[in-house]
Amino acid sequence: MVCKTCGAVINDGDKICNNCGDTIRVDVDNKVSLNKGITPQDQFRQKAEQFGGITVKERRGTIFASIDPKMISCILIALALAIFTLVFFIYDRKRTTIKVDGFEATLPASMREVDDFTFEVLRSEKCRSFANTDIEFTYVIYDVTTLIPELGMTPASNDVDALMEYYDGKDKLVTLKTDFADGLDETFTEQLKDYELIENKNGVLKFTYNDTAMTNNYVEMHIEVVDEKVYQFSVLCSSERKDKMKNQMDDIYKSLKIDK
C-alpha cells in the first residue's frame, strides 16, 4: 500500500504514515484513505513538505479594508486642506520689519516688493512698494528742494535777485511743516473722492480717500515733513475689503518710526 498524501510505502498494520505523518485507515476493501478530520490548511502544508517546505501566512485585513475608497480619498483631501489652511494662517500672521531710508515699518511677511510708482507725484529720491494679495504699502521720499526749488540755488554774492529768491526759499522752509500740510489738505479736499481728514498737526497730514482712477481702492495716507525731507506713506486695499483689512493697515501705521 502507498500513502495517498505523499506516495510513500505503508506497511501492513501501520496507522500513521512514517513519511508525512498522516493518519490512515483501511477500508473494508483494504484500500488506504486519509483521515477525513484533517483541515485543508494541514493537507497543503503536508504536501508542501515534499518540495522542501513552504511557510503559509494568513493575510489579515488592515484597518482600512472595510472603508470605502471614496471615503478615504475625501478624508485625505480634507486633511490636506486643513494642513494648508493652518500653514497659511501661521504664515499670514507672521511679520517682518524693514529698516530703510531713514525709517522703519513692520509689514506682513507675505508682502513682496513690486513696481508701482502711482503715488510718486513729483520727482522723488526714493519710491518703493510692497504688496501681497490683500494690501499694498508704498513710501515716497521727496527732498525739500523739490518742493522749494529756490533752496537748490547757489547764487553769487553780487546776484541780488538770486539771493532774494534763495532767502525767500529759506523763509518757506521755516513754515514748510504747516504751510505744506495746509496746502495739501486744501488741494486734496477738492480733488480726491471721499477725502476724509484724520490729522493735520505739526507737519503731519493723515487722511483717507477712495482711488477710482484704475480700480476701486481704499487708501490711507500719511505725509510728514522731517527736517529737509518729506515722507509720504500710503496703504491701500480693495474698497470691498477695507473693513476686513482695517486692523492690518492700522498696525502698519502704528509701527512707523521715522529717524529724527
Image (cartoon, helix red, strand yellow):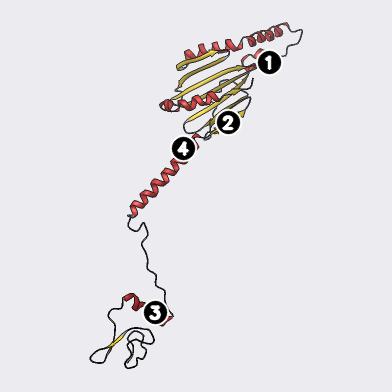
Rate crowding at label 3 as few (under 14), some (14 to 19) or many (20 or more) other CA atoms within 10 Å: some
Q: Distance between the residues labelled 1 and 4?
A: 50 Å
Judged by depth in the image, the label closer to the viewer, 1 or 4, is: 4
Q: Can residue 118 be seen by looking at this rendering?
A: no
Amino acid type of disc 1?
A: Gly
Residue depicted at 58% across the width and 10% down the height:
178
Residue depicted at 46% across the width and 37% down the height:
89
Q: Height in image: 30 above or below 40? A: below
Q: Distance between the residues labelled 3 and 4?
A: 61 Å
Q: Earlier in the sequence, mark 3 or mark 4?
A: 3
Q: Distance between the residues labelled 3 and 1?
A: 104 Å
Q: Mark 1 points at which residue?
A: 152
Percent x, y of residue 143: 64, 19
Q: Distance between the residues labelled 2 and 1?
A: 34 Å
Whether residues under marks 3 and 4 lie with C-beta atoms below 8 angstroms apart, the answer is: no
Rate crowding at label 1 as few (under 14), some (14 to 19) or many (20 or more) other CA atoms within 10 Å: few
Rendered image: mark on residue 48: 3
Judged by depth in the image, the label closer to the viewer, 2 or 1, is: 2
Residue depicted at 29% across the width and 82% down the height:
35
